Image (cartoon, rainbow, N blue to C red):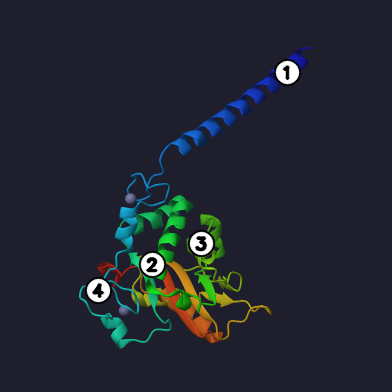
Amino acid sequence: MYRLLYTHCLLLLVREIIIFHFIAHHSMRLIESLLPAQCLVCALPSNNKLICQYCEKKILTQRQYCLHCALALPTSSDYCGDCLTKDHLFEHIHALGDYSKPLSTLIKQLKYQQQLVAGELLASLLKTSLELRYTQEQLLQFDLLLAVPLHAKKLRQRGFNQAQIICDSLHQQLGIPMLTKQISRCKQTLPQEGLSIKRRELNLRAAFTYKETPTQTLTGKNIAIIDDVVTTGATVNSLCKLLKKRGVNSITVFCISRTPLSRNEVK
Ligand SMILES: [Zn+2]
Ligand SMILES: [Zn+2]
């Protein structure tokens, strides 16, 4: 008798909990839908977009940068000193902007706070900046998009690859196919932050491998590498070496931020 009463009470309690969660969930969604959407950058009303017009315009305003490596330039020259004297394996780097606010904040929100919506916004801003630089015809010349791969252990820890999030969105928006399974990061590298240029190159030597598949050849392809932040280009160069060995025709880099090494990291 008591056992029956106990089971009945337990069932009632479970039902109450389910009803409470249902109401709480749906009322939150109702409140969210009634509130005006806010800009992810300045938190002001954004007309149901992820970013307001003012912040979008500010980010997309052309800065002075090296036409080859996208490094910010203090003067109105076309190329930085490094690009005037060195050859690169890539055609050029296209960056949405420098590694400063608000882009640095959005990148951190994506990478360390798992705010995938920040990735969605960054990818859409990158796509708009690509369309400002290239014609549709030029964009159609790219055969494949390749997100810089993360090592499997890092991928498990973070749960996602931030470069792949941006790449997935560009793939959907631009309709360019992606190279997803053939290239992987085989070496668990040290974090690049705090390392000198030389050490970064050593750290990334032979960091990537290519797995042959009968259906996908890289020979003659024009590839766009996607990354969130490019600093010395050591990661990109390591990938370029592998791709060039596989007969790739051209490599271009699309990234969110291009940043120089800070002074204490240069030596
Ligand atoms: Zn705003
Ligand atoms: Zn340059």
The 10 Å Cα crowd at callout 1, few under 14, some 14 to 19, many 20 or more, is few
Where's ligand 2: which quadrant?
bottom left
- CB atoms at circles 1 and 3 under 8 Å apart? no
- Lower position in the chain sequence, tag 1 or tag 4: 1
The 10 Å Cα crowd at callout 2, few under 14, some 14 to 19, many 20 or more, is many
Residue under pointer 1:
8
**Amino acid identity at mark 4:** Leu
Foreground disc of the pair 3, 2: 2
Q: Secondary structure at mark 3?
A: helix
- CB atoms at circles 1 and 2 under 8 Å apart? no
**Amino acid identity at mark 1:** His
Foreground disc of the pair 3, 4: 3
Residue under pointer 4:
73
- Lower position in the chain sequence, tag 1 or tag 2: 1
Residue under pointer 2:
129
How far across and down, in percent of the image, does residue 165 sit?
51, 60
- Above or below, 153 against 79 in this view is above
Asked whether, in this view, residue 114 is left or right of residue 105, the answer is: right
Residue at position x 54%, y 60% in the image: 155
Q: Secondary structure at mark 4?
A: loop
- The C terminus, quarter of image: bottom left
Please tell me in which quadrant of the rendered image residue 80 appears.
bottom left
- Lower position in the chain sequence, tag 2 or tag 4: 4
Q: Give the numbered dot on residue 169.
A: 3
